[in-house]
Each structure stands twice: as structure tokens, then as C-alpha cells.
Image (spheres, helix red, strand yellow):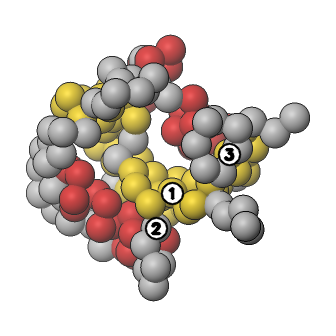
Amino acid sequence: MTDRHLVDVHVLLIRDGQLLLSKRRGDDEFDGLWHLPAGKLEAGESATTAAAREALEEIGVVIDPVDLHHIHTAHVVGSGREARVGLFFEVRRWSGEPVNREPDKSHGLQWFPLGQLPESEIIGYPLAGIRARDTGATYSERGWH
């Protein structure tokens, strides 16, 4: 069997110096931790189209894919899940007001000032992409020895 890598897309919605995070709901170790709006790339879909689709599905905002700015790529293995490549996109323009459209997957949404993020309560993988926004690091690896 050939190993595969999933492709995840993550969206950093930034408004008035604040970042939108979603509090994960589930029966795993990530329950209650903050995460970005995110999801998996589907067959036949570009990464920016997937990011815009996930934002609409999860938080109800409409994003034009041309408004998504790629800021980071992370290659992640060893998390107990399938290996993945995560693409992180920043967006400052969208239509609609974010709402929790997936209450079965999220406890809720909250805006955080960029300088006051609850870093100890954010899942490490998306935190790498969030930090990259400030550091300018365009690539990271997690879980490799």
C-alpha cells in the first residue's frame, strides 16, 4: 500500500487586528482547543477553492479565492493521524458575518487580538501557520525526527 499525504487548507480571517478561531468539539485530545477554520482538499479542487469552500461550510462567510494570500506550508507526520501537508491562507476581505455552522464539530467562534492569542490552548499544527504570519517563515515540518 502506498502512503499518502492529505492536503489541509487553513484560513486566517483577520479583521481589525483580530484573528478568528474555532474551539474544536470532538472525542479526541483536541476537544476544547482552538483551531483555524480548515478542512481537506477534495478531488478536482484547487487549494484556494477548497479554502473558500471550507470557510463557507464552517463559518458561513463567502471568500473570493483571489483574496486568499498563501502565507505558510506545513508538512506534518507522527500526530497519530495520516501524514499531511497544510496550506495556510490569510484573508482580510469576505462577505457575511462568521457564525458557527458546524456545532457538532465546534463549541463556538471567537475573535482574538493578534498579540493576545491563547497559544497554549491552540492545536500545535495550526499554531505553526499562525506564527508564520508574524515570522515570515513560509515552510515548517512537524513530527519528523
Residue pushed farthest top?
120
Viewer can see residue 138: yes
Q: Considering depth in this image, is 80 or 30 the residue closer to the camera?
A: 80
Q: Secondary structure at mark 3?
A: strand
Q: Residue furthest right?
A: 145
- Position of residue 99 measured from the top left corner of the image (x, y, whole percent): 13, 44
Q: Amino acid at mark 1?
A: Asp
Callout 2 amino acid: Leu
Q: Secondary structure at mark 2?
A: loop
Residue pointed to by mark 2: 41
Q: Residue at x 46, y 67 (%)?
A: 41
* Residue drawn at 31 percent across, 60 percent down: 54
Q: Is residue 144 left or right of residue 78?
A: right
Label 1 or label 3, whichever comes before in sequence order: 1
Check disc 3 and report the residue beneath it.
Answer: 76
In the rendered structure, which disc, 2 or 3, sits on the residue that comes first in sequence? 2
Q: Disc 1 to disc 3, how far (Cα)?
A: 10 Å
Task: Say if 96 sits above or below 105 in the image.
Answer: below
Judge whether 110 appears above or below 9 on screen.
above
Look at the numbered disc 1 and give the secondary structure of its residue. strand
- Name the residue tied to disc 1: 8
